[in-house]
Image (spheres, rainbow, N blue to C red):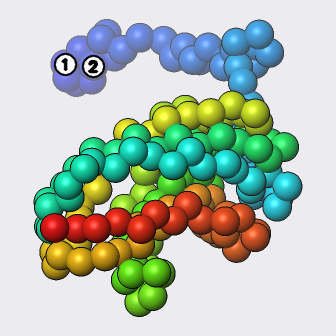
C-alpha cells in the first residue's frame, strides 16, 4: 500500500501537449517538385576549353569547361533544393574518350555538377579533372549534358562538344 501511495504522490496531473502551431506562410516554403526540362530548355553553347600542351597516358589533368544555357528555363544544379537531392533531375556535364574521329565510343564517364543552377542566357565554368586514356594515340574527347533520370541533351539534337586530342 505504501508503494501505491508513493507512486500516487509522485504523479503529476495529465497535461495535454500544446497544439501544433498553425503554418506561417511567411516562414514556410513549399518544397519544389523535380521537373523534367522540355526540349526547348535543353540547349547550350560550348566554349572549347584549352587543353594542356602535353597529355600523358593514364594521367589526370585539369580542364575548365564553359557552358552557356541558351534554352528557355533554368537548369537545376545537384542539391540546389530538396527536390534535386543527390542529383536526381539535375543537369550535369559528362565526357568520354572515343577512338580517333569518334569511332569506338564507350558510354559517358564521370558526371560533373554545375556549381549552381544556371538561368537562361548565363554562362558557367566547371573546373573538372579528367583521366587520359592509358594508351598513347589520337582520340576524340566528347562532352554532353544530361538531365539525370531524363536524357542527354544530344538526344534533343544538341551537338556534343568534340575535340581531337593527342595522348602521349
- Taking the spot 25% from the left edge, 50% from the top edge, the residue there is 53
Residue 62, given in percent of the width and then of the height, sits at 27, 45
Q: Position of residue 95 (x, y in %)?
A: 43, 64
Q: Which residue is mark 2?
A: 7
Disc 1 vs disc 2: Cβ atoms closer than 8 Å?
Answer: no
Residue 149 seen: yes
Residue 5, picture quadrant: top left
* Image quarter hosting the C terminus: bottom left
Residue pictured at 44% horizontal, 46% vertical: 49
In the depicted view, which residue is nearer to us: 151 or 43? 43
> Horizontal placement of 91 versus 112: left or right?
right
Residue placed farthest to the bottom in the image? Answer: 104
As displayed, is residue 90 above or below residue 151?
A: above
Q: Which of the marked residues, 1 or 2, is nearer the chain's N terminus?
A: 1
Q: How busy is the neighbourhood of tag 2: few (under 14 within 10 Å), some, or many (20 plus)?
A: few
Q: Image quarter for residue 97?
A: bottom left
The residue under the point 76% across, 69% down is 156
The answer to whether any part of residue 90 appears in the image is: no
Number of the label disc, if any, that sits on residue 35: none
Badge 1 is on which residue? 2
Depicted 64 relative to depicted 41: above or below: above
Q: CA distance from mark 1 to mark 2?
A: 8 Å
Is residue 3 rendered to the left or right of residue 36?
Answer: left
- Name the mark nearer the viewer: 1 or 2: 2
**Picture residue at 29% right of the left edge, 56% below the top:** 130
Where residue 24 sits: x, y (%)? Answer: 76, 13
Q: Secondary structure at mark 1?
A: helix
* 140 left or right, relative to 148: left
Q: Nearer the viewer, residue 167 or 31?
A: 167
The kind of secondary structure element at disc 2 is: helix
Q: Nearer the viewer, residue 90 or 120?
A: 120
Q: Is residue 5 above or below residue 74?
A: above
Amino acid at each position: 500500500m505504501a508503494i501505491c501511495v508513493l507512486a500516487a504522490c509522485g504523479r503529476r496531473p495529465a497535461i495535454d501537449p500544446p497544439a501544433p502551431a498553425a503554418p506561417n506562410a511567411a516562414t514556410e516554403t513549399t518544397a519544389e517538385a523535380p521537373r523534367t526540362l522540355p526540349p526547348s530548355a535543353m540547349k547550350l553553347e560550348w566554349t572549347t576549353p584549352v587543353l594542356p600542351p602535353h597529355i600523358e597516358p593514364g594521367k589526370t589533368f585539369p580542364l575548365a569547361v564553359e557552358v552557356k544555357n541558351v534554352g528557355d528555363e533554368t537548369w537545376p544544379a545537384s542539391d540546389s533544393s530538396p527536390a534535386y537531392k543527390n542529383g536526381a533531375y539535375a543537369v550535369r556535364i559528362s565526357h568520354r574518350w572515343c577512338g580517333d574521329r569518334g569511332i569506338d565510343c564507350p558510354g559517358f564517364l564521370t558526371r560533373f555538377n554545375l556549381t549552381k543552377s544556371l538561368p537562361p542566357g548565363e554562362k558557367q565554368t566547371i573546373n573538372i579533372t579528367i583521366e587520359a586514356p592509358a594508351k598513347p594515340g589520337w582520340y576524340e574527347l566528347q562532352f554532353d549534358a544530361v538531365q539525370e533520370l531524363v536524357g542527354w541533351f544530344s538526344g534533343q539534337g544538341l551537338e556534343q562538344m568534340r575535340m581531337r586530342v593527342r595522348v602521349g
